[in-house]
Image: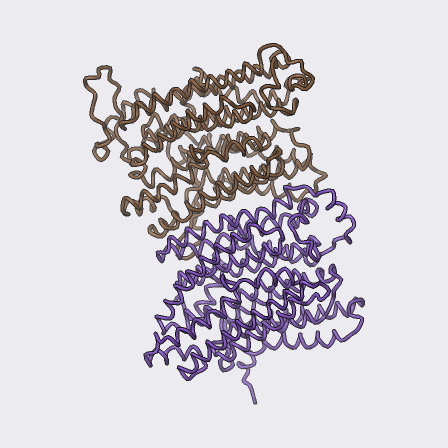
Amino acid sequence: MTWLNSHPLTFLVFAPTLLGFLIMALPHSLGRLSRMLGFMGALAVFVLSLAWLLGHSGTGATIFIERAPWFTLVGLPVDYHLAVDGLNLWLVLLTTFLVPLTMLGTWNSLKDRIGTFAALFLLLETGMLGALMAQDLFFFYLFWEAMLIPMYFMIGVWGGDERRYAANKFFLYTLSGSLLWLVALLYLANKAGGFNPILMGQAASALPFSVQCWLFISFAVAFAIKVPLFPLHTWLPDAHVQAPTAGSVILAGVLLKLGGYGFLRFAIPIFPAAAMHYAKPLALLSVIAIVYGALVAMVQRDIKKLVAYSSVSHMGFVMLGLASFTVIGTQGAMLQMLNHGISTGALFLLVGMVYDRAHTRMIADFGGVAVKMPVFTAFFLIVTLSSIGLPLTNGFVGEFWILNGAFLSGFGWGRLYASLATSGVLLGAVYMLWMFKRVFWGPENKDEDSGTHHLHSDLNAREVAVMLPLVVLILWMGIHPRTFVAVSEAPVANLLREANAPPVRTFVLKPAVHQAPAAHEAGHEGHAAEPAAHEVHR
Amino acid sequence: MNLTPSQWAALLPLLYPVVGACLVAIMSLDKDQATTKWIRAAMYGTALLAVGATFWYLTDLWTTGSQPAFYQLHMDRLAQFTGIFVVVAAALTILQGWDHFHQEGWVKGETLALLLFSVSGMILFASTTHFVALFLGLELFSIPLYALVGTVRARSESAEGGMKYFLTGAVASSCFLMGGVLIYGLSGTLDLAIAAPVLAAKGLGTDPLVLVGAALLLLGFLFKVSAVPFHQWTPDAYEASPHPIAGFMSVATKGVAFIALLRIFPVAFRELGVVGVKMQAVLAVLAVATLVLGNLTALVQTNVKRMLAYSSISHAGYLMLGFVAGTPAAFNGVLFYLVIYLAMNMGAFGLLTAFGLVGEKTTFDDLRGLGWKRPAMGVSAAIIMLSLAGIPPMGGFYGKYMIFRELVATGHVGMAILGVLASLVSAYYYLRFLVALFLQSPGVEAERLASDRPAVHAPLAGASVLVCAAIVMAGGFLQAFLADGFARRALVEGLGLLR
């Protein structure tokens, strides 16, 4: 127990892997037992993470830290450095929460090799938690890459008809970004004499600005592929559509977050100047992602593909919030990452539930589902509204903060881009509600081959038990978002202050006092106006 | 001639395999060797014993830290490292050979005897700077391999591959010999380590003839590591030879050639600064060509053995990048890489035996769905293939990491980018192996053939694959121990680098 008291993070990260190996060693015939074992293990990890991490939270400072030198290879020391702080606390909890929930939600979706699937799921959990907690960049890189392996097999073995193509595309696409990133990482580590992000930041600031920019670009591309940011999003629809439900949920719920988190944790703190320099292109790509993702989602005929493209749009908001370099925008991005994990995860689960019954996901195959599955419809409606961003649901708060942040940001482009991005909210309502109308309302589709015809049962107790916590969270995050962002406020403010973010433009009604573009002030006492952001925030 | 104990100590690692080879050759005179189980067991047992004795002896030398010498034969740390490397590869080959030759129905004791001679030649090749000893070693390990490639005489392409390997190999050997002759003629000494200072003192460091001689020597090495453009024999030879022999060639030949290259060019020729620099430029160009050609050609292969052959060509490219960086830490990375590469490639070829692929039936289609039928082999295959692709946390990643890190540190960022792009390409064809094993279900025809096929029981090959997978994983978690405790000590105490 004393070991456990001093190494809670190690336990959380590696316990799933140990269990996963145990399950792999069990024979195939014990698949049902393996599934149960995997679920119980994941649930235990969730309960423990909740108890340990929330029991100690309250401040924005580091909550848990485990650090020891690991090895020194070719002169570069690598630290075994795990930490939970304000930036990753809720993402860690989101991960530990979604894994058992997804296992329960897709309990009967898979028919064969369920034990192996559970084992891979647990290995994936280790990868995700490790990447979220690792503070040493080399250590982070290990988890970041290792995470691909279980996901590759989850898509490739249990996926749809095009699964091999999708799995290879997912793997190679992500690998291409991270391999080039590795070279940048080595370059910087060489200058810094190690992989500690603080040392790397110091080393980076001593480099010529053009070199900093190149290094930032390679970091940004690796993370942007994961987010995925337009135009690096093309792997996502394939992976999402072909992956089994559980894979899609985790892909959308956690893996995409790691991209945004990577920006926040590593790319921006290490290269603040370059990040400011590229804020505009990043924001522009985010706005394109928001609008483009929404427009493409609108014309999809497959519900799952629609949700996949809506992910592109929603993650565009996250990137816009980060690119605004305001406290409220960044906090909004943090919240939007959690929102997207909950809402899109829930959507994928719901699509999976209807697919398990109807064996089709085509919108045209449905119609009048509300009559046949009222409970399901109710849940779907709540999640849809949250995805649209209806006030009182989580989506509203996140998107509002992000738009607010972009609007207030000190960059000259802020207002224009915020206005453009607002259309994404509108388009979101269009594609979601239009899909909802075609699937759930209207006359019942009586066609023998239709999906609606095959819907014989409403949600059972297990499925309701899966959806209920998600709905509670959707409302909780919509009504009292501070629960989820209070802890990240101090680190975010600190990060922006150290990055010399341009001061927010105070909201003035008279255009006469309009100030000159604030980008030039970046070097000066930039954070004088930040309390204004706090005011808006509250 | 009376030898001192120290001289004996230097010679014994070469003698054990030779004695074993002679014993096996005598046993293989038995006419019933293919059918009588005990004589087969005795031959394999003798071979394993010889290899085991060498291993035991070398590890004993390693732990005591003594570095005996027999005239120009230096059984120093690096030679001990090479010896351990080669005998481990040989032991895995023998284990896999038991199952493979049984599956092929082609059991001949000569293969073992030839293998053991080859082992002896390899250890000699990597433990001397004396040109004649070097050439002897080269021929002593090459000639048995020519025969081994063509060993399955029942298959016509086996003879073809063997002949192709032999002819090209003979040309490369004669080039190597010519290079040595030129250096000898100009310097008056056969010891390359002494020739360099002599040439430098005579002011012949940049003499065209010296450059030609060095280039010809380099050609000999590059042929053995199958670097582009001397790689043409590789796919044919690997495809022709029995799986374990192909694995042994891909690992041991490449390994000793790189280690001998390390002993000669960056170390013995250190005095001839210009030659070193010029050869580095040549190596850089050839490394790029090797990476590009090896990886791109591997993409389109349908035969697993040819894919592995091109993959081994591309791995030669990564190792050459280590020489391009040329720092002691990069050589440390090269040796570490070789250790992991030993496990990866012996494992990869062992998998073919473990899955019971025989004859020409070594396409990706023949592997379909087998990962689920033999889960332990499947998991090992996943570990080995992902490691070959350089995905962490497998050992292969750290090998590439060390080499790329030195490339970046010495200012070869462009080469490092090319290297990572090459490993991105390589990920595709390694994944294809896993796609076949796990992501594709066996076709109806394949199922029928599988039921026709004699039951696959390859316990020894399976065990050797598990060992390889374990080494690969260990390389990922005990990387510092392997790199510092094993590879680095060979460099520091063997060559005096890195001090």
Instruction: Kindly identify the residue that appears in the image at 59 percent across and 74 percent down.
Output: B120
- At which x and y percent is residue A332? 38, 25
Instruction: Kindly identify the residue that appears in the image at 32 percent across and 32 percent down.
Output: A280
Q: Which chain is purple?
A: B
- At which x and y percent is residue B135? 52, 77
* Quadrant (top left/top right/bottom left/bottom right) for the C terminus of chain A: top left
Outermost residue toward the left in this view: A512
Chain A colour in the picture:
brown
Q: Is residue A43 visible?
A: no
Residue B201 in which image quadrant? bottom left
Q: Is residue A287 visible?
A: yes
- At which x and y percent is residue A404? 34, 21
Outermost residue toward the bottom in this view: B1
Foreground residue among B23 and B151? B151
Instruction: Kindly identify the residue that appears in the image at 70 percent across and 40 percent down.
Output: A28
Foreground residue among A329 and A47? A329
Q: Is residue A503 left or right of residue A367?
A: left
- At which x and y percent is residue B431? 57, 46
Seen in the picture, residue B492 relative to B372 is either above or below; the reply is below
Seen in the picture, residue A175 relative to B259 is either above or below; the reply is above
Seen in the picture, residue B209 relative to A41 is either above or below; the reply is below
Q: Is residue A354 left or right of residue A170?
A: right
